[in-house]
Amino acid sequence: MEVVSTDDFLLTNLELKQHQLFDEKGFPKTYHLNKLAQMIQDFRDDAPQVTIPDYSHELADIRPDVQKVIQKPDILIIEGVTALQLPDHILDLAIYVDAKLADIESWYLNRTLAVMDKARFDAKSWYYPYTQMPLSQRQEHIMSVWRRTNLKNLQQYIAPTKAKANVIIKIDAQHHIQHIEYDD
């Protein structure tokens, strides 16, 4: 089994800036979804391995000098907010993980604060400049990004893909499964 993140198919920060898309990073148009679909098709065509980019959360960008070699797995899981943006025919099973908006927002804040905390001693990290802010200012910045970008992405692009799912898994604030709904 192999898990591939859609983040590995994001446009680089340079590409995002060149196309004036940086403030929409994470929206479907900021991914090379065609390359992700091609990777899946390559495995279906019995390619023994594929080489893909490598996204770094510390850099918040594709690593320019690193690629991942993925050996053909028995099971390939594509995870990420744009996974269900792929054409229906390319996915064997589509799973949508759903939660209350307040929980998603809280996870976003806590995850981003944790990444920033980890970056406080790494001046190369994308998040390092934010670690120099007082905590309250950091939290306000994170929530501003949430409202401006991530919430918009969730409402306009991610949530509508729920209709494409074969399975919907509803989770609570602790990530415990509350309910599983199957498409008959």
Image (spheres, rainbow, N blue to C red):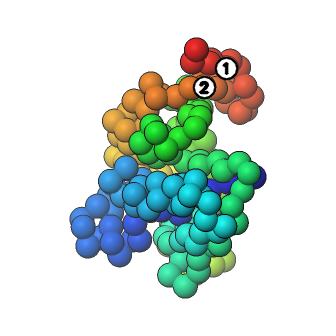
Q: Is residue 160 above or below residue 44?
A: above
Q: Measured from the top left, where is residue 147 in percent x and y?
A: 38, 42
Residue visible at 59% across and 34% down in the picture: 93
Q: Is residue 134 visible?
A: no
Residue visible at 39% across and 71% down in the picture: 13
Residue contact between numbered discs 2 and 1, judged by CB atoms under 8 Å: yes
The residue most toward the bottom is 65
Residue visible at 59% across and 48% down in the picture: 79
User: 97 and 23: which one is in front?
Assistant: 97
* Residue underneath mark 2: 167
Q: Measured from the top left, where is residue 116 in percent x and y?
A: 60, 63
Q: Is residue 174 above or below residue 36?
A: above
Q: Measured from the top left, where is residue 2 in percent x and y?
A: 71, 55
Q: Is residue 119 above or below residue 26?
A: below
Quadrant in which residue 117 is drawn: bottom right
- As drawn, the label of residue 3 is none
Amino acid type at image mark 2: Val
156 sits to left or right of 150: left
Amino acid type at image mark 1: Ile
N-terminal of the pair, mark 2 or mark 1, is 2
* Residue underneath mark 1: 180
102 sits to left or right of 149: right
User: 104 and 52: which one is in front?
Assistant: 52
Q: Is residue 65 visible?
A: yes
34 sits to left or right of 172: left
Residues at marks 2 and 1, CA–CA distance in whole angstroms = 7 Å
User: 167 and 50: which one is in front?
Assistant: 50
Residue visible at 62% across and 17% down in the picture: 181
Q: Report helix, strand or loop for mark 1.
A: strand
For the C terminus, give its image quadrant: top right
The residue most toward the front is 45
Q: Report helix, strand or loop for mark 2.
A: strand
